């Protein structure tokens, strides 16, 4: 890569470093705990859990339904960066504003969290769609992995600092832990804004021949294009099969991410143990995501993804037998080996089988499936646990058996992925792209 390409790649990847602060400090770290203990103080835990679940679900539905439409509109007007800036500013403003929410003001906290989540997920649609234009030919896997690697490192560094502040508030000039947590929300917003600047400055907006619509025309053309894309995906065997496989195995991955804390608590581990395990996964994920990017370049993304799925199969069975904190930490390390890799290579593999110039709308579908992920997994875990309890198993045993049930998602996703032919997908994508360019000629 030349200097310009390197600057563009690093600037693009730094956005993952930027917005991962929200994923770790807010989503995974402090918001759930602070929501229960500060903004919903004195409220029954079941009620506060329902409120938080509603906020998460509403944000997920808004993005899942809106992402393909927004992507199609952005492609028609070549407006990916403008949409990214809009969503990033929304996320930064809402995240920073959480620091101002007083005790008991749960309604305000929910609304700000909702807008911050929409800003985070909406921005990722357009961030992902910039990958094909940023990555040099045949370097997509490494560039995608670089983004995830920096995300794990950046999110982990800020989260570790924020945890330190809450454990030693007086050392940082805070009156108590609550004040430190509120500052942590502000720090996540500042971090996100600061490290998003290089992408805005040095990443070029990819053009598309004949696509210069503006205003209402851009919206009309985008919505019309969305219908065509639905039909294309249905008949584009490679993309359809990949998205089906991705939905299944990423559902298993996301379920493990979301259920890990609950599972650890059910085994009797303390909150501090679980935060440490989260930090372990973050910092192990940094070098391992990079390593998976190189592995994908060497043996192909499909084989590397299948290898990661195999590791997750082992994790879903091994997790049922752990007894000690040391084993829980070992499990966190193993997950860190593959979590960033399977996410990064899935993104880059997909970028290679979609039509050039229409990445935003196709990544809209990709991110839609990402938002609808962790639907089957939690239900599978819950039903398996209930069935085990009805058959006389104790609570801990039922939880252990429920984790094993996730192997079904990894097995079925892996089998479908075996039938995905990347070469055929790239030929079909080239044919669709050439058809689009021909159709745009006056």
Image (cartoon, rainbow, N blue to C red):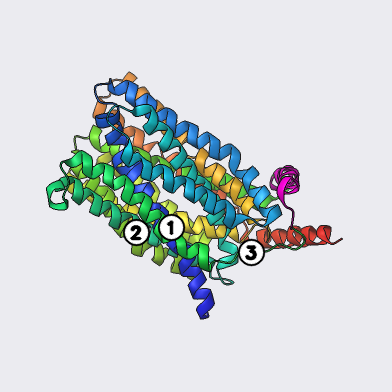
Relative placement, left or right, of 137 versus 402 is: right
Mark 1 packing: few (<14 Cα in 10 Å), some, or many (20+)? Answer: many
Callout 3: SS: loop
Relative placement, left or right, of 125 versus 160 is: right
Callout 1: SS: helix
Mark sitting on residue 16: 1
Callout 2: SS: helix
Identify the residue position indicated by label 3 in the image.
206
Mark 3 packing: few (<14 Cα in 10 Å), some, or many (20+)? Answer: some
> Which numbered disc flags the more N-terminal residue, 1 or 3?
1
Badges 2 and 1: C-beta atoms under 8 Å apart? yes
Please provide percent x and percent y for residue 267: 22, 35
Inter-mark Cα distance, 1 to 3: 19 Å
> Which numbered disc flags the more N-terminal residue, 3 or 2?
2
Extent of the magenta region? 212-233
Badges 1 and 3: C-beta atoms under 8 Å apart? no
Please provide percent x and percent y for residue 107: 38, 27
Nearer the observer, 225 or 251: 225
Identify the residue position indicated by label 2 in the image.
154
- Give the quarter of the image for residue 358: bottom right
Asked if the stretch drawn in magenta spans residue 24, the answer is no
Nearer the observer, 384 or 188: 188
In this orientation, does residue 300 appear?
A: no
Inter-mark Cα distance, 3 to 2: 27 Å
Residue 159 versus residue 298 in the image, above or below: above
x 48%, y 49%: residue: 89
């Amino acid at each position: 890569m030349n200097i310009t390409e390197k600057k563009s790649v690093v600037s693009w990847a730094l956005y993952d470093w930027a917005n991962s602060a929200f994923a770790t400090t807010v989503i995974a770290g402090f918001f759930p705990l602070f929501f229960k203990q500060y903004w919903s103080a004195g409220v029954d835990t079941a009620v506060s859990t329902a409120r938080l679940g509603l906020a998460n679900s509403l944000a997920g539905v808004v993005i899942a339904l809106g992402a393909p439409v927004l992507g199609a509109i952005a492609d028609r007007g070549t407006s990916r960066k403008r949409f990214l800036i809009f969503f990033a500013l929304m996320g930064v403003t809402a995240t920073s504003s959480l620091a101002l929410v007083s005790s008991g003001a749960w309604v305000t906290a929910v609304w700000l969290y909702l807008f911050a989540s929409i800003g985070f997920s909406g921005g990722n649609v357009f961030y992902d769609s910039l990958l094909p234009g940023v990555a040099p030919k045949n370097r997509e896997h490494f560039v995608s992995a670089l983004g995830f690697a920096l995300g794990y490192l950046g999110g982990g560094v800020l989260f570790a600092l924020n945890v330190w502040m809450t454990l030693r508030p007086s050392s940082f000039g805070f009156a108590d832990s609550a004040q430190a947590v509120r500052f942590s929300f502000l720090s996540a917003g500042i971090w996100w804004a600061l490290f998003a600047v290089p992408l805005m400055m040095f990443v070029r907006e990819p053009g598309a021949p004949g696509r210069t619509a503006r205003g209402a025309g851009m919206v009309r053309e985008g919505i019309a294009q969305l219908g065509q894309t639905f039909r294309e995906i249905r008949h584009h065997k490679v993309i359809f099969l990949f998205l089906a496989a991705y939905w299944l195995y990423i559902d298993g991955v996301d379920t493990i991410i979301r259920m890990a804390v609950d599972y650890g608590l059910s085994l009797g581990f303390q909150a501090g143990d679980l935060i440490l395990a989260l930090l372990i996964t973050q910092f192990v994920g940094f070098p391992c995501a990079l390593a998976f990017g190189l592995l994908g370049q060497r043996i192909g993304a499909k084989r590397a993804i299948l290898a990661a799925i195999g590791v997750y199969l082992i994790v879903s069975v091994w997790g049922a037998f752990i007894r000690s904190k040391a084993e829980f930490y070992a499990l966190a390390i193993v997950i860190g080996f593959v979590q960033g890799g399977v996410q990064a290579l899935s993104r880059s593999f997909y970028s290679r089988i979609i039509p050039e110039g229409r990445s935003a709308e196709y990544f809209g579908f990709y991110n839609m499936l990402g938002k609808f992920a962790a639907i089957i997994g939690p239900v599978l875990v819950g039903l398996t646990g209930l069935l085990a309890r009805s058959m006389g198993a104790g609570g801990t045993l039922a939880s252990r058996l429920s984790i094993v049930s996730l192997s079904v998602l990894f097995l079925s996703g892996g089998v479908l992925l075996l039938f995905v032919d990347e070469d055929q997908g790239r030929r079909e994508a080239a044919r669709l792209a050439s058809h689009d360019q021909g159709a745009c000629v006056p």
